[in-house]
Amino acid sequence: MIKNCLKLKDLSIQEITKILAVAEKCKDGAYRNVLTDKIVANLFFEPSTRTHYSFNVAEERLGMKVINFDPASSSLQKGESFYDTVKTFEALGIDAVVIRDQEDEYYNKLLGKIDIPIINAGDGVKDHPSQSLLDLMTIKEEFNTFKGIKVAVIGDIIHSRVAHTNIEVMERLGMECYISGPKEYEDDAYRFIDLATALKTMDVIMLLRIQHERHLSESAMSPDEYHLAYGLTLERVALMKDKAIILHPAPFNRNIELSDDVVECSKSRIFKQMRNGVYIRMALLLRSLLSSSEWEKY
Ligand code: CP
């Protein structure tokens, strides 16, 4: 059976717990160079820094051979399709593909037609499973539990695959989830909390990038106005609970959703999230490329 990782909804709590446990072992130095016979292709059809290169580092740590596809110098420029590009890598003998694309559920074009695992590195506004897993790893390291942990996701909810993926899995894990920020970025499917209450009561403040390339041009609110109304400043950080933490999937807009001095303040776990991303992605690659019986032993 092909072990894709397409959306977290497909994974049971038991499977998610296993991935988090393997990631922690990877963080402790385990499983270096266990996939030296495997070749992986990173196919990023949409820009990425963290996800692309943390998969790259994870693959290197596992001893894999890595092909980093460059759309700009590929036959996409001659009109080759997404499907034919992925199918070509399969024909070349690649063992797995890591794919990011701007189209929601791009993988539906591939399912049943390619016989190698697909690891989703982000699709449109739908899912970003490895990001949510690294967020969960960072929360678990902090609080040692998910049950009852309160999180507010603040910002551009409606177009955020991180928000959608996280809220679904966090609620399944027993966390109490809210959204906050401007009404125009809200998604009615979720519970709203005002910023002042969120700062005082949440264990996790998760900020999202304001996708100004898509929104602020249509918005009544300028970046400065957004920062004034919703941006996390040190004054607002001082209102948070003692043990509360700040997460952000990044890239972040300094001095819009958070001020410069908050990025690396004592409550920020933003760079820890990035580091944990390497270990989560090692675990996902192991899950997809080891046999089920081998994976069970990890
Ligand atoms: N968090 C995240 O997905 O960042 P990149 O877009 O840089 O991969």
Image: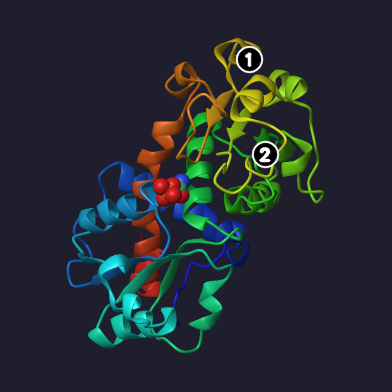
Q: Nearer the viewer, residue 72 or 237?
A: 72
Q: Quadrant of residue 71?
A: bottom left
Left or right of residue 239, residue 57 in this image: left
How would you rate the neighbour count of disc 2 (Cα within 10 Å): few for under 14, some for 14-19, many for 20 or more?
A: some
Q: Position of residue 209 (x, y in %)?
A: 55, 39
- From what the image shows, is residue 216 above or below residue 262? below
Q: Residue at x 43, y 38 (%)?
A: 273
Asked which colour scheme the image uses, the reply is: rainbow
Mark 2 or 1, closer to the camera: 1
Left or right of residue 165, residue 269 in this image: left
Which amino acid type is marked by label 2?
Lys
- From what the image shows, is residue 264 above or below residue 161? above
Q: What residue is shown with label 1?
A: 236
Question: Is residue 109 shown to the viewer in this render?
Answer: yes
- From what the image shows, is residue 238 above or below residue 17? above
Q: Position of residue 177 (x, y in %)?
A: 72, 40
- From what the image shows, is residue 17 above or below residue 10? above
Q: Which mark is residue 147?
A: 2
Q: Quadrant of residue 60?
A: bottom left
Left or right of residue 284, residue 183 in this image: right
Which amino acid type is marked by label 1?
Arg
Q: Position of residue 147 (x, y in %)?
A: 67, 39
Q: Residue at x 25, y 69 (%)?
A: 73
Q: Quadrant of residue 143?
A: top right
Q: Nearer the viewer, residue 42 or 133?
A: 42
